[in-house]
Amino acid sequence: MHRTSILLLVLSILLAGCGSRSISNSGYYADSDREYSKHSDPSYKGELSEFNVLGIDPNAAVAESDIATALATKQRFAIAKGSTIMLIQSGTMIPDDLMVKSLEKYYNVAVFTGVPQQADSSANNYSRSLRLAAARGGAEKLVVYWGVLETGTENLATKVVSWAPFVGGVLPDQNQRMRIRLKLAVVDVKTGQWEMFTPEAFEDVDSSGRYSRVSSDQAQVAVLKEKGYAAAVDDLVKRYAH
């Protein structure tokens, strides 16, 4: 009987669901809670393609000499503190304020839309258009970043009594584990050369009940964005500032 109880306890702590969403469309979503639909941004139209941002045509013929030339002409990047950069967050009209504020401690930040445009323009033309926009704004470097929030939920052993009232609210019945992963591309406006890096990933775990799902989820999003953006800016400054 004791072994059976332990087995049931273990089985009750199962992965109930997992998924990922863009940092540019980070509203709450859970299949298990039908009353909470996806709180998505109606302006969200998907993500920028790396190929477009970096000016790479995956269908173009590439000669060995092209690769050799690219290696031979590659120069070391530097972004002087106090200089102007053009910042783009993939998938949204305006980068998150937390990211802008973090970068403004070191640079003059001009923002530009990260909403994907019509697919009828070539990757090369799109990249050059971004570089031209940056140049007209006085920015020598273009910084584009992508991010994903990965989540997994665990049903707690208290699930069967999760709606039993207690002073102050309801017993939590679910743990949500969330992780943020970011990727940044730094593009030299004059030459089109680029570098890409991934800063440290961060995780957070929080418990919630049925009626605190949304607030708990969005609190996790806010915490992880703050940590992720701070790490991204710190990494960028260490790599390129002089």
Image (tube, grey):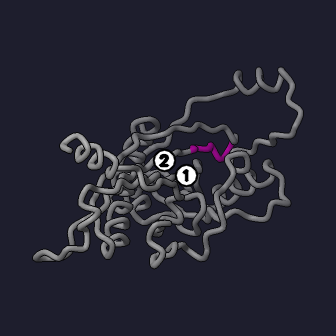
Amino acid type assigned to the residue bearing label 1 in the image? Trp
From the viewer's perspective, is 105 left or right of 236? left
CA–CA distance in space, label 2 to label 1: 6 Å
Q: Main secondary structure of the magenta part?
A: strand
> Residue 67: horizontal and vertical position, in percent?
77, 24
Q: Which mark is residue 117?
A: none
Which quarter of the picture shows residue 77?
top right
> Residue 40: horizontal and vertical position, in percent?
54, 72
Q: Is residue 38 positioned above or below 6 on the image?
A: below
Whether residue 47 is visible, yes or no, is: yes
Labels 2 and 1: the sequence-earlier one: 1
**Magenta span:** 185-190
The residue lying at 76 percent from left, 55 percent from top is 126
- For the residue carrying disc 2, how many other residues have a C-alpha within 10 Å: few (<14), some (14-19), or many (20+)? many
Residue 188 included in the magenta stretch of the image: yes
Task: Depth check: give the residue in front, 83 or 180.
Answer: 180
Q: Which mark is residue 182?
A: 2
> Residue 42: horizontal and vertical position, in percent?
60, 77
Which quarter of the picture shows residue 207?
bottom left
